Amino acid sequence: MFASLNDVAASVSALSQPDEEMREQARLHQSQLTKPPTALGQLEELAIFMAGWRDEICPSINRAQALVFAGNHGVCAQGVNPFPQEVTAQMVANFAHGGAAINQLAALADAELAVHPLSLDVPTGDISVAPAMDEAALLEAINIGAAAVDSTADVVILGEMGIGNSTISAALCAGCFGGDASQWVGRGTGADDAQIKKKAEIVNRATARMHQQNIDDMNTARQGLFILRQLGGREQAALCGAVLAARASRQIVMLDGFICTSAVAPLHIMSHDMLSHCLVAHKSREPGHQKLLSCLGKQPLLDLDLCLGEGSGAAIGLMILRAAMACHNGMASFAQAEISTS
């Protein structure tokens, strides 16, 4: 738990790092398995990635958490969303009753699902005219996310729910990486052309308002937190808190699509190394996601034309990671199988 935003900013200077020797040992292990070199492609790299962060040549995924954070947004007052905000709470209830896609996929991926609604009856500020949160609300949401992570989990998969948060996502991307809002906005849960145009106008207005502050005078750690407070939401802040907690425990994080990835973009502004323990499960249908992935230097595991959220793509990504570890840990070596290599 963080006592203040200064503590959050200071976490940049104490980031854990993967064990490079363990990575090399895992790579050597891969070279001895009964297959041509690199024949399993990205599955091999995933196993090596996990070995470095979990400090084991052959780590296992004994426990996986699936965390979904839900919040509501004041920007919905601008008419940017095709569904009413009541849907956020209704979907949280659907999660609780096991009726959503993430329920099915988390069960299939053997991940323990927990959903955390954050003050759904009190939307954040309308970012087009005011900051989304004050510092106290931002810190509270970050700590909720951090506290939700169980340090005994090997992998944490992350998702979100919140009517209006595709507009928030576009604003965070524009705030972190620049560019006109038209490069970042998409249809979200089904916005029509008029609503997309409205979303772009609102995002441009929000980022212009934010840049009236002396953001360039801040160090990068404070800049990231400032952008998150100005343009984000409670579920975005909670996702950042979860990523920070997982980094402290050297846990692998599986991010979902555009909204989840944009939520943690402020952490990249704080330090380009902050998301090194994170994988991006898939490339979203949202048009801004590919640009965002390029800004973050991330390659998605999958491209399934998904745009649901909820952590649905992250749960599928976990299955890919499990496949990588099953091969890495279970395959015989050439010596064990008595197969000649010459």
Image (cartoon, helix red, strand yellow):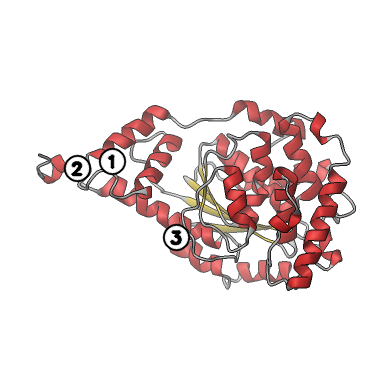
Name the one closer to the observer, 39 or 248. 39
Q: Is residue 101 visible?
A: yes
The residue type indicated by label 1 comes to Gln
Residue to which mark 2 is pinned? 333
* x and y percentages locating residue 288 in the rendered image: 64, 56
The residue type indicated by label 3 comes to Ala
Q: Secondary structure at mark 2?
A: loop
Label 2 neighbour load within 10 Å: few <14, some 14-19, many 20+:
some
Residue to which mark 1 is pinned? 30
**Residues at marks 1 and 2, CA–CA distance in whole angstroms:** 9 Å
Residue shown at the point (56%, 37%) measured from the top left: 247
Residue shown at the point (60%, 36%) measured from the top left: 274
Could you say which disc has been placed on residue 109 in the image?
3
**Residues at marks 2 and 3, CA–CA distance in whole angstroms:** 27 Å
Residue shown at the point (25%, 39%) measured from the top left: 31
Residue shown at the point (37%, 35%) measured from the top left: 56
